[in-house]
Amino acid sequence: MLKKKLTFMLIPSSTGISKQMSIPTAAIYISVAAVVCLLCLSFFLSAEYFAGKVNENELEQLRAENKSLLDKYEQMRWNMAEVENRYSDLVKKEVTIRSLFDLPAVDEGERQLGIGGPSSPHLESMSPLRKAAYATEVEVDRLLKLSKFELEKYGEVEQSLNNIKDRLAHTPSIWPTKGWKSRGFGMKHDPFTGYKQMHRGIDIANHTGTPIIATADGVVRGTGRATGMGKLVTVDHGYGFKTRYGHLSEIKVKNGQRVKRGDVIALMGSTGYSTGPHLHYEVIRNGQFFNPMKYILNDM
């Protein structure tokens, strides 16, 4: 079949001589096959060329994105370094506060508990971008744990300071009235008998009607009269503290009433065992009488 020939007749449209051309069938098949092969090769090469161009463009784009991500991770690490500096400042302040108020210090081993650990076994085989991402993730996790721990410790400090603040507010610390100290605490001569006996408070003299104030926050636990003390007010401040105010001319509070430091609770007088208008002021802690002067921090 391949030896056969195809004959083509070329007939001119006008006057001329007709020509005949014979082409072997094999040559036709070979030519067609060659054309098909060339077309396929051309298509393949074109596809490879354009695919290479696409891949190269994608690769360049990925490289640009990787560089951008690396830059962002580097900036994040700088930002985290600033965060860690601020965290260190907070720790220093917490340590200072604990020292100032005599609060228990935090063990540094406890502060670092659970922080750190072995690195990833695949770290060496990671790309620079994955290394940066991994290092950033580890640093963020570390800072989160540290900040959570420090927040808890600041909560403890806040609670302790609130307790201290409350305790200070309920501790007698100011003069209960204006005037001059006419008699101190301790073994003193009794103005009526002349004999020495224990004087369990201090006397502050002034005019009748001079305001008497609470020397700390508390609750009024007694109002009325008492032998020798005349009209009397007792304030329970908590934390074992009580104060008593005697020889009053008028009581301004009621039993069970809450008072703040500086609130007027009575007026000075000369009721009971007294030689003139004055206040007898006592400080009692856990049932024991103390010199009130140790609990007066301001000027009269």
Image (cartoon, helix red, strand yellow):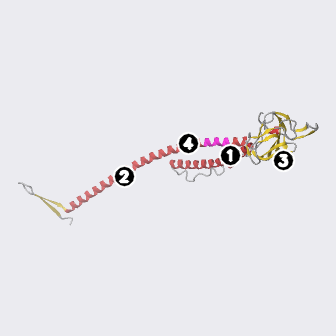
Q: Is residue 28 left or right of residue 83?
A: left
Type of the residue with mark 2: Ala
SS class, disc 1 = helix
Looking at the rendering, in which quadrant would you find the C terminus? top right
Q: Residues within 10 Å of mark 4 (few under 14, many from 20)?
A: few
Predominant secondary structure in magenta?
A: helix
Residue type at the position of mark 3: Gly
Amino acid type of disc 4? Asn
Classed neighbour count for the residue bearing mark 3: other residues with Cα under 10 Å, few (<14), some (14–19), many (≥20): few
Q: Residues within 10 Å of mark 1 (few under 14, many from 20)?
A: few
The span from disc 4 to disc 1 (Cα, nearest Å) is 28 Å
Q: Which residue is drawn at 67% across and 41% down?
A: 93
Residue pointed to by mark 3: 287
Q: What stretch is highlighted in magenta?
A: 84-94
Q: How far apart are marks 1 and 2 (CA)?
A: 66 Å
Q: Give x and y (percent) for residue 10.
A: 11, 57
Front position among marks 1 and 2: 1
At 20% from the left and 62% from the top, the residue drawn is 25
The location of residue 1, given as percent across then percent down, is 20, 66
